Image (cartoon, rainbow, N blue to C red):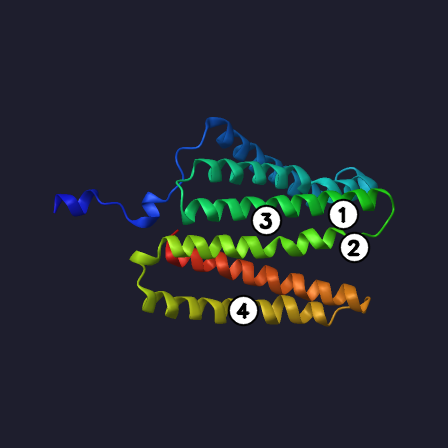
Amino acid sequence: MLEADVTMSPIDAGAPAAMPACTGRLFIAMVIYATVAAVWMIAGFGGEQVMNYVGLLADLPVCLAATIITAAAARRAPRGAVQQAWRCMTFALALYFIGSVIASASWLRGIDPYPGFADIFFAGFYLPLFIGVALLIRAAATRLPWARLALDATIFVVGFGAFFWFLVIRPAAQAQEVGLLKQTLSQIYLACNCLLLLAFGVLQLVGV
């Protein structure tokens, strides 16, 4: 009985080690910054020109901070599927940050970056992130009730997928006409974002 009490589940054993204090402070600063930026965008401080720059550049510091935090988690995670998952997520966020920098630089030069070189990095963001999610699920595989998880995940995917189809994807498809390539990329990004939310929802069902 004592042995059963002290035995760690795969998810517990695979959890990252204690993060350094500076990482926690960086996370708090990131949350405060994101809140201030959101309030700024809603309130419209500074007029149209200032709002344009805030909307254009506000996500770069947060994206960089998130990349640093996931890199620290990957460095301190034990070897195996969990560490590989954090590395994949770090790589994904780094790709997204690079794409954001390229897109912002293009806008500042008066060039529409969409579609463009930045989309290579934005599109590449999804695959390593999905792989990271799959690795986290794999790390929990030995203790998962797969039948119940499959049923819960199916309900979650169908319900959430229907919500996004009728309230996000379908209205976007019926929006005003834009270039074919832009419209196609917009739908691909919307679909990938929906799948990404579903994937993290499944992680919540797993209990990771």
Q: Secondary structure at mark 4?
A: helix
Task: Mark 3 or mark 4: name the one nearer the start of the chain.
Answer: 3
Residue highlighted by disc 2: 116
31 left or right of 15? right
Q: Amino acid at mark 4?
A: Gly
Local secondary structure at mark 1: helix
Quick check: 157 above or below 69? below
Q: Residue at x 65, y 43 (%)?
A: 38
Nearer to us: label 2 or label 4: 2
Q: Residue 92, labelled with which disc?
A: 3
In x, y percent, where is residue 193?
Answer: 60, 59
Amino acid, disc 2: Gly
Discs 2, 1 touching: Cβ within 8 Å: yes
- The residue that disc 1 covers is 103
The reply to whether the C-beta atoms of the residues labelled 3 and 4 are less than 8 Å apart is no
Of the numbered discs 2 and 1, the one sitting upstream in the chain is: 1
Mark 2 crowd level (few <14, some 14–19, many ≥20, 10 Å Cα): some
Q: Earlier in the sequence, mark 1 or mark 3?
A: 3
Which of pointers 3 and 4 indicates the residue nearer the eye?
3
Residue 53 higher or lower than 198, as above or below: above
Secondary element under disc 3, as helix, strand or loop, is helix
> Which comes before the other along the chain, label 2 or label 4?
2
Quadrant of res 135: bottom left
Q: CA distance from mark 3 to mark 2?
A: 19 Å
Three-letter amino acid code at the position of disc 3: Ala
